Amino acid sequence: MIGAMPPAEHATTPHAYAEVNLDAIAHNVGIHAAHTRADVLAVVKADGFGHGALQVAGIALASGATWLGVTTCAEALALRAGGITAPILSWLHSPAEDFGPAISADIDLSAASPAHLRAVAEGAARAGRRANVHLKVDTGLHRNGAVREEWPELIGQARRAELDGHVRVRGIWSHLISGIDPDGQQIRAQVKLFEEAVELARDAGLRPELRHLANSVATLAAPETHYELVRPGIALYGVEPHPQHHFGLRGAMTLRARVIVTKRVPAGSGVSYEHDYITEHDGNLALVPLGYADGVPFSSVADAEVWIAGRRYPVAGRVAMDQFVVDLGDDPATVGAEVIVFGPGDQGEPTVAEWARWAHTIPHEIVTRIGPRVARRYVGASVEGFEEVPGV
Ligand SMILES: *Cc1c(COP(=O)(O)O)cnc(C)c1O
């Protein structure tokens, strides 16, 4: 279902919320689809990069994606419980897991080693049905996946499991070290190794119909990595993944709050813990009820700015667990004034990419860390039954 309010078990803060624009996500899926002839698997792990996995899945499938990708079986099963019937691939497991429930729910499973494959085959036997498997080969990232020396064993075992009726190898896949590769050499090396793995699999009698390698930036900028399926994540949420080229993506999340306390202090006043910030002039301070427990990074403090009443103001002093202070200078401070922490940048408000820079991190970390205390609200023409909730 699209447009659901957050689950009632979360005690959400009443004066802040993350607005998720589903039209922006639909637009971004369309941009990816326009850059490839492959099928698009929308990566909705980590609760849809913090945007709400079920809502993102719904709009992504409605706007051109045909697959969904998640890390854990629990994430995949939550999508099924939410009514999603599209194919789902789950890729981060221990061989100690019971794969029976995921197989029963028709979740495709990645197998990263012979031990994983064995566990999937056992789960399939228990579930009484064939598991769809994607063999994960390591082509240089050295994170997950079978290294070259393991390929013959993994592939041989996969073929035997197919003949036993327990699995069907539907895919073979790998992950890039970086989608940004100025001279293309690193991607070429990974593609070459990947194709060796595919050939080895075919020689063993496997017929994986889905080869996949590309993340967001490779979907937009490295067509040689597309094959039959691409796996964009961050760019679906509107973060431009390439430092030089912009693809016309739209930021999907706007983090909004209201000022809850104001005060006037004299020049030379220290603000927030340890008084790291000292006001230069007599002026007004505004208190915003969001802190690092809500995902506003503590480490951003030296540079961070927010948008209030049509202009940017600096965050004054340390971000606390639940709140931070803004220095309005001589501008008037009003309880209830709207604060945009970040948004798509259309009005001049800070973006996720700027916050990432200020916090010395990557945009992925900014959006995925927006905490459970922050309600997600869904906007966009595509939202069925959406009602504006007044008066935060
Ligand atoms: C997270 C993830 C993606 C998406 O990567 P982006 O850089 O966010 O597009 C794709 N594939 C795998 C295996 C991932 O873990």
Image (cartoon, rainbow, N blue to C red):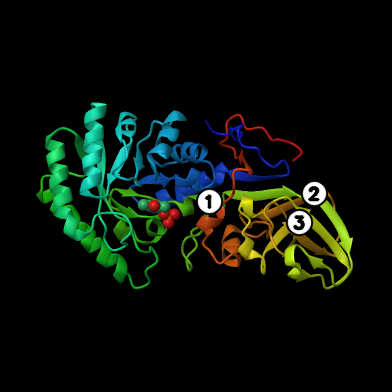
Which residue type carries mark 3?
Ile
Mark on residue 260? 2
Q: CA distance from mark 1 to mark 3?
A: 24 Å
Image-quadrant location for residue 131 = top left
The vertical placement of 281 against 248, above or below, is below
Q: Earlier in the sequence, mark 1 or mark 3?
A: 3
Question: Of 374 and 187, which appears nearest the observer?
Answer: 374
Q: Given this view, does label 1 or label 3 mark the residue nearer the observer?
A: 1
Is residue 61 something that shows in the picture?
A: yes
Q: Residue at x 57, y 49 (%)?
A: 252
Q: Earlier in the sequence, mark 2 or mark 3?
A: 2
Is residue 83 something that shows in the picture?
A: no
Horizontally, residue 309 falls left or right of residue 51, namely: right
Q: CA distance from mark 2 to mark 3?
A: 13 Å
For label 1, the residue is: 368
Mark on residue 382? none
Instruction: Tell me if the residue at label 1 has its CB under 8 Å from ligand 1.
Output: no
Which residue type carries mark 1?
Thr
Label 2 environment density (alpha carbons within 10 Å; few <14, some 14–19, many ≥20): some
Q: Residue at x 22, y 43 (%)?
A: 117
Instruction: Tell me if the residue at label 3 has its CB under 8 Å from ligand 1.
Output: no
